[in-house]
Image (cartoon, grey):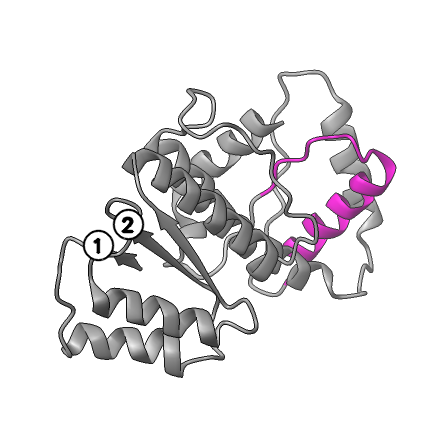
Amino acid sequence: MHCNPRKAHFPRSFLWEDCEEAFLKNTEGKPRLIYHLLEDGKATSDSVQQLIEQVSNLNTTSKAKIIGHSGDPAEGLYKAYICVEKIVKQDILGFENTDLETTELGSEDSMADEDDLGDVLWDIHDEQEQMEMFQQASSSAQELGFEKYYQRLNDLVAAPAPIPPLLVSGGPGSGKSLLLSKWIQLQQSTAPGTLILSHFVGRPKSSSAEAASIIKRLMLKVEGG
């Protein structure tokens, strides 16, 4: 949510009702972020200030993060980005350590390009989907007959390039995802420092099935090491 004090009046309208429903009544909702753009260090709209105070008073479970900011909009964007990244990692992906390095706002190193911010958030969302599919695929204990495929995959990885890819075909439910996920788990346990690029495709119309999304995700993982 973006509160702009230049709009001096915040009438009892559909917008006000939506804000009340989202921030005041729906206390069990997902974590929310309010970016409040101040003018001369304070809110010039009494209605917006009233809403901010009401949200602050109800925010007993840290469900809403309020950023009060005045100054360069780029600095405000960076502050909002840091908070969104922390919320996604902690509340959605379940990461315990979400401490981020602090740099001086406004410096060249601290300001990310708009495309870079989009890539990071897109990558986090896509990784969540990939983690869910990987966990679902590897949850089965059935590994009958996989040993010969494990060996062929190991030989494929160890062989010098160029080498044709190993194609494992089969219908839905035949165990292709299970084979890949189990082999990845073995590689992670024996060589934890190895970068393994994998991609699981979910529903046909999901973003995981788009070729451009697959290439973009794998490139981001390579760049990130």
The x, y position of residue 12, in whole percent, is 15, 79
Say what secondary structure mark 1 lies in: loop
Q: Is residue 86 magenta?
A: no
The x, y position of residue 223, in whole percent, is 54, 25
Q: Residue at x 85, y 42 (%)?
A: 189
- The N terminus lies in which quarter of the figure? bottom left
Amino acid type, residue under disc 2 in the picture:
Leu
User: Residues under labels 1 and 2: Cα distance?
Assistant: 5 Å
Q: Quadrant of residue 92?
A: bottom right
Q: Quadrant of residue 131?
A: bottom right
The x, y position of residue 126, in whole percent, is 49, 49
Q: Quadrant of residue 7?
A: bottom left
Residue with the mark numbered 1:
4
Residue with the mark numbered 2:
37
Q: Is residue 12 left or right of residue 180?
A: left
Q: Residue at x 70, y 54 (%)?
A: 96
Start and end of the magenta stretch?
Answer: 174-198
Q: Residue at x 40, y 38 (%)?
A: 78
The x, y position of residue 112, in whole percent, is 41, 29
Q: Nearer the viewer, residue 155 or 188?
A: 188
Q: Is residue 21 positioned above or below 119 on the image? A: below
Q: Is residue 87 left or right of residue 97?
A: left
Assign the magenta stretch its main secondary structure: helix
Say what secondary structure mark 2 lies in: strand
Q: Nearer the viewer, residue 147 or 30?
A: 30
